[in-house]
Image (tube, helix red, strand yellow):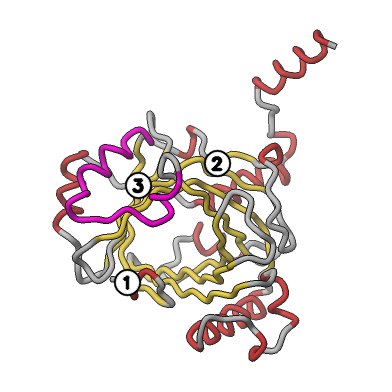
Amino acid sequence: MAEARGFSLLERFELKYHIPVEWADKIGAFIAPYCEEDYYSKITPGGFYWITNLYLDSPSWTFLGWKKKQLLDRFNMRIRTYGEHPAQDGTFHFEVKRKIKNICYKSRATVKGINPGEVWHMAPEEWPCKGEKDRKYLKDFLYKTSLHNAHPRLLTQYKRRAWFGLREEYSRVTIDTGMRFREENGFDYTVDPHYMQSTGIPRFFLPGCDAVLELKCPCSQVPYWMIDLIRFLNLKQGGFSKFGNAAAEWKRIYENPRRFKTPYWTKLGTTLEENLY
């Protein structure tokens, strides 16, 4: 279990469900005999910590197109870090998330102390990786960016509360909410909430829901307590793609500006300022 937490490669099932975020404590109580809360959830007030992902794709949105076509073998690429306002030279995880039919394969290479954009200008032996496995997966990451002409497209964020299973080699429960994004064509991880667009909006969720519950486990070892949780909450499986939804909003706002309408609350705020000043 400890080895899986600091993984370089994972093979797993991922089951997604739309839920109200208010269910988080109820879910935590139900799985408490089988799970341990994630370290960052433990030290964060309220249990929800920020995750920041920089997604890469080609100018013609190759990876997004694969997803829309529902190809049976596809992947996307991202560079992950943690915190609402991450350091530009902190710890970054270069991840390739591949999906073959219903099984997800996730590789990760970790570098520390540099901006992720610098690795393209360094020799492999100079990369500040944790170990040789990280170096191997980072080489593969860079090869794929060259092969598909992938570069930064979208910076996404969300808040997560998470648990690890205590008895399985790898099992994980996560609740994500507060999804948002902005366009990013470089490696700038600066976040100003005023310039982030929300994808945690009703049209991406089932009625009454504002969070995504994910149950993750090895293909050959689905814990019985996960099945009990599904039955206890009467959950119905539903999809949610943070990258796909962010790209859809980006296209709606920037590629089709005539279809984008200023939110009504923004108009009210502008009118109020005019009246005050």
Q: Which mark is residue 70?
A: none
Estimate the spatial distance between the alpha carbons at disc 2 and disc 3, rounded to whole Å: 16 Å
| Residue at point 28%, 71% (across, down) | 1
Q: Which residue is mark 3?
A: 213
Depth check, front residue: 245 or 94: 94
Q: Which residues are magenta?
A: 21-44
Number of numbered discs: 3
Residue 247 higher or lower than 66, as above or below: above
Q: Which residue is mark 2?
A: 199
* Image coords of residue 120 (percent x, y): 71, 79
Q: Amino acid at mark 1?
A: Ala
Q: Amino acid at mark 2?
A: Thr
Q: Amino acid at mark 3?
A: Leu
Depth check, front residue: 88 or 20: 88
* Image coords of residue 247 (percent x, y): 60, 51
Secondary structure of the residue carrying numbered label 2: loop
Estimate the spatial distance between the alpha carbons at disc 2 and disc 1, rounded to whole Å: 33 Å
